[in-house]
Amino acid sequence: MDKSFFSVYLVYGYNNLVKSLVALHLGATLCSLLSEYDMLFISPAKYLSKHHLRILSLYGIEKHFSFILMEDPLDQYNIVNSLLLFSSRKNLIVILDNFTIFPLRIYGSRRLNLKSQKAFVEQAAMIKHISRKNNTPFILTAPEHGDKPMYWRFIEKYVDRLYRVSIDGEIVKLTIVSKDLSLIGSYELGEIEDLVQEDLRKLMVNILERY
C-alpha cells in the first residue's frame, strides 16, 4: 500500500461544481485503490448534483459513501474535531467541500482577523494530524484567489498535494501544482459532462500514483 495516498489534498479553482466533481473523482479513485475504506463527503450544498451521483455509480461505491450536510458553518469545526476519534475506528477517505467556508461564513469577511485566523489554522492542523495519525486521506476544496488557493499562506504547510482546476473555453483542465505554486503537470479532462466518463478512472489512478 502506497503510504503517500494518506495525504491532505487540496483542489482549488473558480468553478465550485468542477472542483467538487474532481475532488469526488480523486476520493472515489482512492476508495478503489485502498481496500476496506469508506468515503465521507462533507459539504454546505443541500444535495449532490446528478454529476456527483453518476460518478458514485461509475465507481460502484454507493454502499461505501456517506454525505453530511453542513447547515451551519460551525458544523465544520465540530465535525473535523469528531473525526479524530471516528477515523481511528473506521477507515475513511474524507472530502471536505469548500473548506474555506468556515471563516467566511462565521466571520463574514475574506480578511481574517486574529481570532478567525487562529480557528482556521487550528482546523487545518487538526486535519493534517488526523491524516497522519489514522491514515485518513483528506481532500479539501477551496476557491482560487488571485493565482493561489484562498488563505494559502495559512494552510500551505498542512497540504501535501495541490491541484488546480480551470475551464479553458469549455474544456476542464487539471493542473498539478507544487507547494511553491509552480506547474508540475497538466491534463485536459474534457467538458463538464465528460467528468463522469469511465476513461477518467485510469487517468486519476495515474495522477495519484505519479504525483
Image (tube, rainbow, N blue to C red):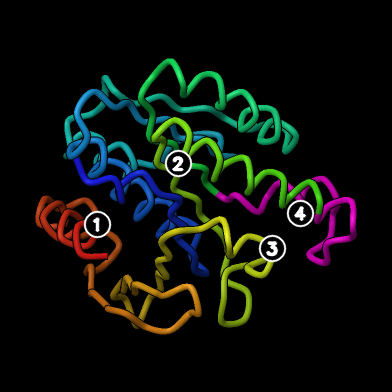
Quadrant including the C terminus: bottom left
Q: Secondary structure at mark 2?
A: strand
Is 17 part of what is drawn in magenta? no
Q: Which residues, given as a range, are shown in magenta?
A: 98-117
Q: Is residue 10 left or right of residue 6?
A: right
Residue 152, horizontal then vertical, whole percent: 63, 68
Picture quadrant of residue 75: top right
Residue at numbered disc 3: 154
The image's mark for residue 104 is 4
The image's mark for residue 95 is 2
- Against 67, is 210 above or below? below
- Residue 57 vs residue 176, the one in the foreground: 176
Q: Cα distance, mark 3 to mark 1?
A: 25 Å
Q: Secondary structure at mark 3?
A: helix
Q: Earlier in the sequence, mark 3 or mark 1?
A: 3
Q: Residues within 10 Å of mark 1 (few under 14, many from 20)?
A: some
